[in-house]
Image (cartoon, helix red, strand yellow):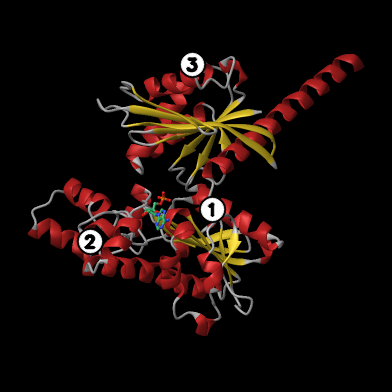
Amino acid sequence: MKVLVLNAGSSSLKYRLIDVTDIENMKLMAKGICDRVGSEASQHVCSIDENELRISIPMENHDEAMQVVLDTLSSGPLKVLDSLDEIDAVGHRVVQGGKYFSHSVIIDDDVIKKIAELSELAPLHNKAALSGIHACQKHMPGVPMVAAFDTAFFQTLLPKAYMYPLPYDLCKKYNIRKYGAHGISHRYIAERAAEFLGKPLQDLKMITCHLGNGCSVTAIDHGQAVDTSMGMTPLDGLMMGTRCGSIDPAIVTFLEEHEHLSPEEMDDLMNKKSGILGVTGISNDLRSIGDAADQGDARSQLAYEMYAYSVKRYIGQYIAVLGGVDVIVLAAGVGENSKRMRRLIFEGLETIGIIIDEKRNNATQGEREISSDDSNVRVLIIPTDEEFMIARDTYELVEEREEQKAHAHEEEVSSVHNK
Ligand code: AMP
């Protein structure tokens, strides 16, 4: 089954075409991104194996971006399909699934209506996903589509974890609660970690850390998410590349008042001008900050320490929430690549049985363990792969539906025979 995985952002459309033989056998056929969609500088980058195509091309909206993607896959120098009919299914990443979706679903009119209704909670992202869904309906009518939600994994949280201590009626009126984010990534790394250890997920207390430009930590008790650091929106929790994460809420009104900021300006400040970028004033990229810290930049050193401290604090919280932990998993750009950050995060945790092996921490590739043999807690690095997870869900749901259809058809035929 050839599955096209789409991840539509506010001004981008990322995609992967994956050939799925079964869930153990997936082959990447092509991947790419349409960037700065809606601006004059829009461009498309597509790569197949070692070959890359990079072109500046006008794309006013996601519909036009979709056309560019499909044209590239089915014609021109990087063509991988003789016809678009070869695409069997499409998997869409949708950021906000609200209270409606606790797992991935086949997209129908009702699902589309609910994704639209939830746009209020993730305006840029859900609207972008809808554009992608509508573009597929137009360019590939009849091809089954699946929605994989970033929030779905956290629908197992109990009210004590997802409710906010604000007036109850207001929370109910506006659906204010913790929804979490990065759920596709947390689910993927948790499952892979269990497989790496050769133990059932249901036997483990796990803390998964997605540490990239966006950051979140999740507590997983015997396979079920029980708490997560992102909240009603992906602004909450850890310090991130440009997002502040949790701060004293009183700072919001204080700054609005003293700096004469509108709610939109304050939102922009917290989402785009804070985090590593805000503290350093240099960059949101941890690599640049590491270099600047080495050259003696005090604010870069501070940002490094704050980032690590923020992760350490959540790990501590979630050990208490879980009543202990068997395995801690790190993923995404920083978690997978920065040995320096990993060292800082786990520094001083030897007394509670978390011991990092320096040599293992310095290794660079693939799924691996970085804890020492005498550590009570296993610490793993699992490169995340959200597109793989979406392709797998898409494959499973579409296969299941085809089987149900075939079964229903067989029953119909046999009932005609028996008449
Ligand atoms: P992501 O959002 O998962 O793409 O992660 C982006 C973050 O990972 C940025 O802050 C990068 O600086 C960081 N990152 C990527 N590679 C490395 C590396 N080799 N060392 C340190 N940080 C890295």
Three-letter amino acid code at the position of disc 2: Thr
Q: Quadrant of residue 202?
A: bottom right
Which mark identifies residue 280?
Answer: 2
Residue 394 left/right relative to 414 = left
- Identify residue type, mark 3: Gly
Secondary structure under badge 1?
loop
Gap between marks 2 and 1 measured at Cα:
27 Å
Q: Residues within 10 Å of mark 2 (few under 14, many from 20)?
A: many
Amino acid, disc 1: Pro
Q: Is residue 162 in sight in this rendering?
A: yes
Specify whether residue 419 is in view. no
Q: Earlier in the sequence, mark 1 or mark 3?
A: 3
- Find residue 414 and report its image quarter: top right
Q: Tell which circle, 2 or 1, labels the residue nearer the N-terminal end.
A: 2
**Foreground: disc 3 or disc 2:** 3
Residue at disc 1, CB closer than 8 Å to ligand 1: no
Identify the mark at residue 383; answer none if there is no mark: 1
Q: Which residue is mark 3?
A: 76
State if disc 2 and disc 3 touch (CB < 8 Å). Answer: no
Label 3 SS: loop
